[in-house]
Image: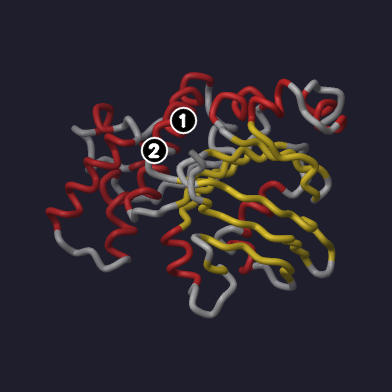
């Protein structure tokens, strides 16, 4: 049975100061699925990812054409203010970026900003999100320690816990494991598989094996264009486009 469509991208183009970074992209992402974006460096993957929560808007001289809809509502409409969009669409960056606060305060921060003051609600959410990111057993006795005392992999899982604490519906991940060791990378990949039960996930990765392991759908980008999008299994076993095949077999990139 086909799932509902969560994100619909229609003929999206995005330019920095008149120079096109992504061109004429159309993609549908189903609810509770993982879309992986692959392609060589500088091909527009991260730019496209940041269009989904309009994070590129802070850059001077940008322009959009086309549309992005979440639950069939355009994110460019006047009804969709940026704050509510970013509450609905969380973001996890390549480099873990915990706040210089305690482990507990990292998670509580976004909740407090969104007006949640009830101590009991906050404490429950801290435990819930740390369990969801497989961190609780590792940090439950040191919640008042600085987040900076955690390892790189733990910091990245804390950033994911902080993201889901404000209950988004979509999580964008920009190479979330690229700076991590293999054990921490595996934990992040397991976490992505677990999180898709509740969230819709779009992940940028340079790691072909990672895309094959974690995603349902894979999109191959090259020089700002979407070359091919299909089920991950088909992309990695029988791609339709010769350029896709050349990229995944390591002939360029």
Q: Tell me, yes or no, whether the two marked residues, 1 and 2, touch with CB atoms within 8 Å.
A: no
Residue 188 on image: x %, y %: 46, 30
Q: Earlier in the sequence, mark 1 or mark 2?
A: 1
* Residue 197: assigned label: 2
Q: Report how far apart the C-alphas of labels 1 and 2 lie in the structure.
A: 15 Å
Q: Furthest residue to the front? A: 1
Scheme of image coloration: secondary structure
* Residue at point 49%, 73% (across, down): 80
Say if 246 sits above or below 156 in the image.
Answer: above
Mark 2 surroundings within 10 Å by alpha-carbon count, few (fewer than 14), some (14 through 19), many (20 or more) = few
Task: Locate residue 146 relative to residue 43 in the image: left or right.
Answer: left
Pointer 1 residue: 188
* Residue at point 76%, 62% (across, down): 13
Relative to the observer, which residue lies in front, 238 or 138? 238
The picture quadrant where one finds residue 118 is bottom left
Per the image, label 1 sits on a secondary structure element best described as helix
* Residue at point 80%, 49% (across, down): 225
* Residue 79: assigned label: none
The picture quadrant where one finds residue 42 is top right
Say if 134 sits above or below 53 in the image.
Answer: above
Per the image, label 2 sits on a secondary structure element best described as loop
Q: Furthest residue to the left? A: 120
Relative to the observer, which residue lies in front, 59 or 166? 166
Task: Locate residue 154 relative to residue 33 in the image: left or right.
Answer: left
Say if 82 sits above or below 52 in the image.
Answer: below
* Residue at point 12%, 53% (across, down): 120
Q: Which quadrant: the C terminus? A: top right
Residue 234 on image: x %, y %: 69, 27
Q: Nearer the viewer, mark 1 or mark 2?
A: 2
Residue 247 on image: x %, y %: 81, 29
The picture quadrant where one finds residue 249 is top right
Residue 237 on image: x %, y %: 72, 20
């Amino acid at each position: 049975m086909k799932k509902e469509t969560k994100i619909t991208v229609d003929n999206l183009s995005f330019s920095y100061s008149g120079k096109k970074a992504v061109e004429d992209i159309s993609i549908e992402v189903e609810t509770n699925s993982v879309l992986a974006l692959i392609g060589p460096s500088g091909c527009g993957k991260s730019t496209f990812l940041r269009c989904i929560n309009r994070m590129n808007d802070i850059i001077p001289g940008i322009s959009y054409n086309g549309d992005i809809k979440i639950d069939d509502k355009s994110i460019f409409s006047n009804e969709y203010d940026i704050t509510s969009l970013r509450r609905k669409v969380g973001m996890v960056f390549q480099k873990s970026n915990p706040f210089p606060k305690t482990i507990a305060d990292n998670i509580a921060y976004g909740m407090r900003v969104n007006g949640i003051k009830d101590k009991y609600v906050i404490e429950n959410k801290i435990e819930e999100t740390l369990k969801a990111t497989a961190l609780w057993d590792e940090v439950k006795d040191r919640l008042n320690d600085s987040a900076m005392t955690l390892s790189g992999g733990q910091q990245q899982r804390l950033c994911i816990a902080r993201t889901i604490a404000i209950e988004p519906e979509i999580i964008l991940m920009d190479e979330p494991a690229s700076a991590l060791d293999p054990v921490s990378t595996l934990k992040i990949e397991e976490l992505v598989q677990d999180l898709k039960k509740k969230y819709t996930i779009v992940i940028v990765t340079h790691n072909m094996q990672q895309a094959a392991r974690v995603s349902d759908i894979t999109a191959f980008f090259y020089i700002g264009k979407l070359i091919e999008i299909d089920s991950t299994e088909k992309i990695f076993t029988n791609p339709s486009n010769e350029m896709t095949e050349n990229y995944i077999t390591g002939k360029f990139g």
